[in-house]
Image (tube, rainbow, N blue to C red):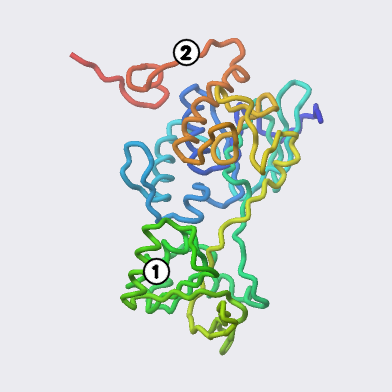
Amino acid sequence: MNSTVTTPDAIEADAVIIGAGPVGLFQVFELGLLEIKAHVIDSLGAVGGQCVELYPDKPIYDIPAVPSCTGQELTDNLLKQIEPFDPTFHLGQEVTKVERRADGRFDVETSIGTRFITKTIFIAAGVGSFQARTIKVDGIEEFEGSQLHYKVKDPAIFEGKNLVICGGGDSALDWALNFVGKAESVVLLHRREEFRAAPASVAKMKALCDEYEMQLIIGQATGFEAKDGKLSELKVTGADGVTRRVPLDMLLVFFGLSPKLGPIAEWGLDIERRQLKVMNTEKFETNVPGIFAVGDINTYPGKKKLILSGFHEAALAAFGAAPYIFPDKKIHMQYTTTSPKLHKVLGVETPVFD
């Protein structure tokens, strides 16, 4: 649907980035090098996407030239890197409407009424808007946020406590191993003997169980007991049909995420298995000219869901978008090492070599 009405309070922009995770932040940088200012929208209340929301303290080992960094450290460094480009962040709001205008630009509106008129859109929304898969025990939701947690924001609150951790993936294993020696006790609860986590983590967990440093229970949570208004025991039914009671102070559940494209699914974009198809790997443009998809949300032959792949995609998408923003300008490839123009854009001095 085309739109022609110009809303007086609409923000006119060259580029709107949907998603403030690592790839969205690096998209700001690549656009900035081409002197394109970006507005960044994210449904979360802070930047960093899944890296900060789900595993801020978990090490990441495959960022080029960075042997190890946490999700929070990666986000902090990206924010420092894009400071020269002064992006505008619009957090805690979801893009609800995207419509093509008669002049070729797009009308964009968010869930709290922020409006944009933009020449280009970059969708870097990861897996889309995501929600943690919840534990299916009637009534246990009343303890969410106090004793029932689907993510770890402050590890310190779990220290010295009796923990039950549910799940069989990397998040469950990582946090179980992390809290051994810090918590009073750690019980890992998984519905089956097979795990989705890294084999090294599974081997370490089983070794700690053999040393009685933690405990593994195969079964499913089927009920709970409360005392004085607090969660006191989890009822766990094993494969043998026997239900046992496991005392606890805190329950952590890591059943993974339920990704949802949300309103993105209504924008006329080609979608394949809840991911956005890009027309080619030269520009990472979708089937809608002027809308690009980078990072985990896109799909193409050979796609690998890696942060470093998203960084590469962001660089090429920026060059692909430049003709929409500067139709009469020839864009030349320049290097940050040697280009005085880029040094000026970055606010650094051009080195002088004897």
Tag count: 2
The tag on residue 174 is: none
| Mark 1 neighbour class, 10 Å CA radius: few under 14, some 14 to 19, many 20 or more | few
Q: Secondary structure at mark 1?
A: helix
Q: Secondary structure at mark 2?
A: loop
| Mark 2 neighbour class, 10 Å CA radius: few under 14, some 14 to 19, many 20 or more | few
Q: N-terminal of the two: label 1 or label 2?
A: 1
Question: Do callouts 1 and 2 mark residues in contact (Cβ within 8 Å)?
Answer: no
Give the residue displayed 74% in from the left and 39% down from the top: 97
* Rendered image quadrant of residue 7: top right
Name the residue nearer the viewer: 261 or 136: 136
Up the image or down, 103 lies above or below 56; here it is above
Give the residue displayed 66% in from the left and 43% down from the top: 273
Q: Is residue 18 left or right of residue 332?
A: right
In which quadrant will I find the C terminus?
top left
Up the image or down, 44 lies above or below 295; here it is below
> What type is the residue that disc 1 sits on?
Ala
In which quadrant will I find the N terminus?
top right
The tag on residue 156 is: 1
